[in-house]
Image (cartoon, rainbow, N blue to C red):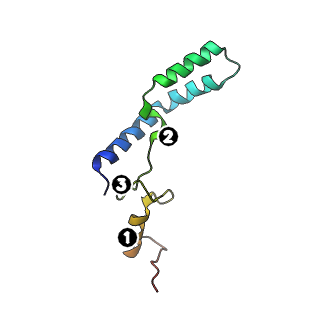
Amino acid sequence: MAKKSSVERNERVKRLAKRYAAKREALKAVARDTDKPVEERFAAQLKLAALPRNSAPTRIRNRCVVSGRPRGYYRKLKMSRIALRDLASHGLVPGMVKSSW
């Protein structure tokens, strides 16, 4: 089990990213638009830099919903390899059988 503080921090980052998504996208569109004057594009870039760092979606870490583990994460199942194996061993994942020979 991951530290609760790490999981909570990641949840805070997710909430911030969701809250600032529209504003961030609008500022990025202005900054990328080559038809706009340079001063306006630069001002948009400065406003973008002034936003909280944790509002960037790249700061979100994929974590297992069962254990909070950040490594060995399966996106389709939203869980780590260890949690998946444990649930599969107990027969809780439909269609998955633990092989043994």
Residue 58 disc label: 2
Determine the residue located farthest toward the front in the rendered image.
Answer: 71
The residue depicted at 50 percent of the width and 20 percent of the height is 47
Comparing 22 with 39, the one in front is 39
Rendering quarter of residue 12: top left
Rendering quarter of residue 13: top left
Q: Which residue is mark 3?
A: 68
Marks 2 and 1, the one that precedes in the sequence: 2
Secondary element at image label 2? helix
Q: Distance from label 3 to label 2 (Cα)?
A: 18 Å
Marks 3 and 2, the one that precedes in the sequence: 2
The residue depicted at 66 percent of the width and 14 percent of the height is 37
Determine the residue located farthest toward the right in the rendered image.
Answer: 35
Secondary element at image label 3? loop
The residue depicted at 37 percent of the width and 70 percent of the height is 86
Q: Position of residue 4 (x, y in %)?
A: 28, 49
* Screen quadrant of the N terminus: bottom left
Q: Are marks 3 and 1 in contact (CB under 8 Å)?
A: no
Tag in front: 2 or 1: 2
- For badge 1, the amino acid type reads Asp
- For badge 3, the amino acid type reads Gly
Q: Residues within 10 Å of mark 2 (few under 14, many from 20)?
A: few
Secondary element at image label 1? helix
The residue depicted at 33 percent of the width and 46 percent of the height is 6
Q: Distance from label 3 to label 1 (Cα)?
A: 14 Å
Q: Position of residue 42 (x, y in %)?
A: 58, 17
User: Relative to residue 47, is residue 90 drawn left or right?
Assistant: left
In this view, 84 is above or below 17: below
Rendering quarter of residue 8: top left
Q: Which residue is mark 1?
A: 86
Q: Distance from label 2 to label 1 (Cα)?
A: 30 Å
